[in-house]
């Protein structure tokens, strides 16, 4: 008797109409649907989201779509890694049922509104979502239009795959706030679950962009998690000054030669307002370049 | 045996959670849901939308909400007529099952983004919808931010009452284009049906704002439909010049002493681009004040 160990590949759908029909059928059958939106190039962080969805839902859908409208013209849209075959194998191993992987033509049939420009290639702007003011700071300042692109495509995916729960990683902390506010403000009938950041054994937060790093850059990249840990130790010891906590983290980056630093910011966990002194809870967020690669990380201090 | 002629009042719900629950239950039971979004102050035009929904759907929901975010500060939000008791009687007579009539606090728990200002009263802007470029012209020029308010609230209503079909009147022609583009661009799983403008026997397009008109103003207001009819006769006789067709309509307004005129515009029925000569189909749109009341009307020329 053969032992069946081969993971089943998930069903791969690339058309909106097919994805809608599949989800409708499962919903009519009374299934609870979990959704894991991704840009592909999957790693164990994405895997943890899919596994959480698998444990909580009857059907799990992952989406793989490198969304052009959330990249500014000078960013890494063209070189962003595409690894669909490996992604399907990873998701199949976790028991994901369906993967929706449309191309940009399918997603933006009516034209797309691009990050930072507010207009599509045709000059005709499509309907889009303007996120709440929580999108204005930090990543919003460094990447104008980025969160409008994210919010718009995620809302589209929520409409195409009307799930009960959608899973996002805490590594993209500001994104989770933007999306939670979107769901609240627009009354979207979906629950957003934020799952912990998954790290390599040496502390580096998992990211699809880590594969851009040379071995030497990867060493320097450890300064982000090291800086957050230094600030966390100080916070645990009673330090509450935002300037001091930020400087502790910044010092690790500078010692490692990481940079330029986009921000090291202590912020309110809900509003991202910048207090002079931390309250009982604060989030410390970092964005910095290491070589040519822009990395982000964060840690909740509490 | 008593003859049952009394119309049943529809179920009135004012909380989002209650409306969601009602609709979920009906959907799970396999019912096809029709939605008629209104600002109340209902007339036979709204009635025709509800009757159409009644004839096509298993359950009919109407919403009554005077949406503050689609009014600019100088507009008639405060004095806009509120006639909920009469509205319920009218809708009950048509067989509407449920009326969702929230207050502004319920709809904008996270703060509201107001037309024309881009910020809520608190200075914190909530997530909102920016409509496509079809919103930029005509009403969009006269009422900055109006369509952002409309698109945002209608999307919220679509999320709260996930219907199969939503019914809108052709009198608000540009609004129907804005909403159709929104549904396409954001992949909203709902079908939009546009129903014919309902007119008084003398041609005046029904509008909640007609009740602002004095008897003398009401006479002058007939010049809008008269102007459209004049242009339509010329179009039928072969006239294709936009300037000539617009001038024919404008002349009726001027003769009646209606005005100021916001626009008399011949436009492409899909894009609202302004051709110099009409093609096989064109839409003629008018917005003008009669006394203190701003009225709109339009007619398809084909």
Image (cartoon, coloured by chain):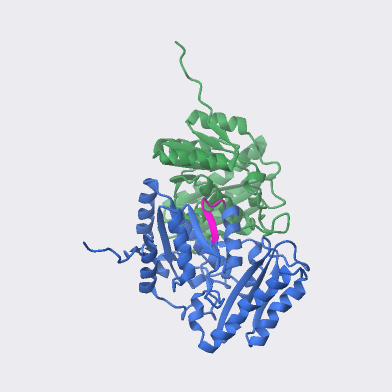
Chain colours: A green, B blue
B166, B101: nearer the viewer? B166
B83, A244: nearer the viewer? B83
Q: Residue furthest front?
A: B1
User: From the viewer's perspective, is B159 left or right of A110?
Assistant: left
B79, B167: nearer the viewer? B167
In percent of width and height, residue A76 lies at: 69, 45
The structure residue drawn at horizontal position 48% and vertical position 31%, both measured from the top left corner, is A94
User: From the viewer's perspective, is B151 left or right of A192?
Assistant: right
Q: Quadrant of the N terminus of chain A?
A: top left
In percent of width and height, residue A301 lies at: 45, 52
Q: Which residues are magenta?
A: B187-194
Q: Residue furthest top?
A: A1
The structure residue drawn at horizontal position 66% and vertical position 78%, both measured from the top left corner, is B227
The structure residue drawn at horizontal position 30% and vertical position 65%, both measured from the top left corner, is B5
Is residue B161 rendered magenta in the image? no
The reply to whether residue A1 is in sight is yes
């Amino acid at each position: 008797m053969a032992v069946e160990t081969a993971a089943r590949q998930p069903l791969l759908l690339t058309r909106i109409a097919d994805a809608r029909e599949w989800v409708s059928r499962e919903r009519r059958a009374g299934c609870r649907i979990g959704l894991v939106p991704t840009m592909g190039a999957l790693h164990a962080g994405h895997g943890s989201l899919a596994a959480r969805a698998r444990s909580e839902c009857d059907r799990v859908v992952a989406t793989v779509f490198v969304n052009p409208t959330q990249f500014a013209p000078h960013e890494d849209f063209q070189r962003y890694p595409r690894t669909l075959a490996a992604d399907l194998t990873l998701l199949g191993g976790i028991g994901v049922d369906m993967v929706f992987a449309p191309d940009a033509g399918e997603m933006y049939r009516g034209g797309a509104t691009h990050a930072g420009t507010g207009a599509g290639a045709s000059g005709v702007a499509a309907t889009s979502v303007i996120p709440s003011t929580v999108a204005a700071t930090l990543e919003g300042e460094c990447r104008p239009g980025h969160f409008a692109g994210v919010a718009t495509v995620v809302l589209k995916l929520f409409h195409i795959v009307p799930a009960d729960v959608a899973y996002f990683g805490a590594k993209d902390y500001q994104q989770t706030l933007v999306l939670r506010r979107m769901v609240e403000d627009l009354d979207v009938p979906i629950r957003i679950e934020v799952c912990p950041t998954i790290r390599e054994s040496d502390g580096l937060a998992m990211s699809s962009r880590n594969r851009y790093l040379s071995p030497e850059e990867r060493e320097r990249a450890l300064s982000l998690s090291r800086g957050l840990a230094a600030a966390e130790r100080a916070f645990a010891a009673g330090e509450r000054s935002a300037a001091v906590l930020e400087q502790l983290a910044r010092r690790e980056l500078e010692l490692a030669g990481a940079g330029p630093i986009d921000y090291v910011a202590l912020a309110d966990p809900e509003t991202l307002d910048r207090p002079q002194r931390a309250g009982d809870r604060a989030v410390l967020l970092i964005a910095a370049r290491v070589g040519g690669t822009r990395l982000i990380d964060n840690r909740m201090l509490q």
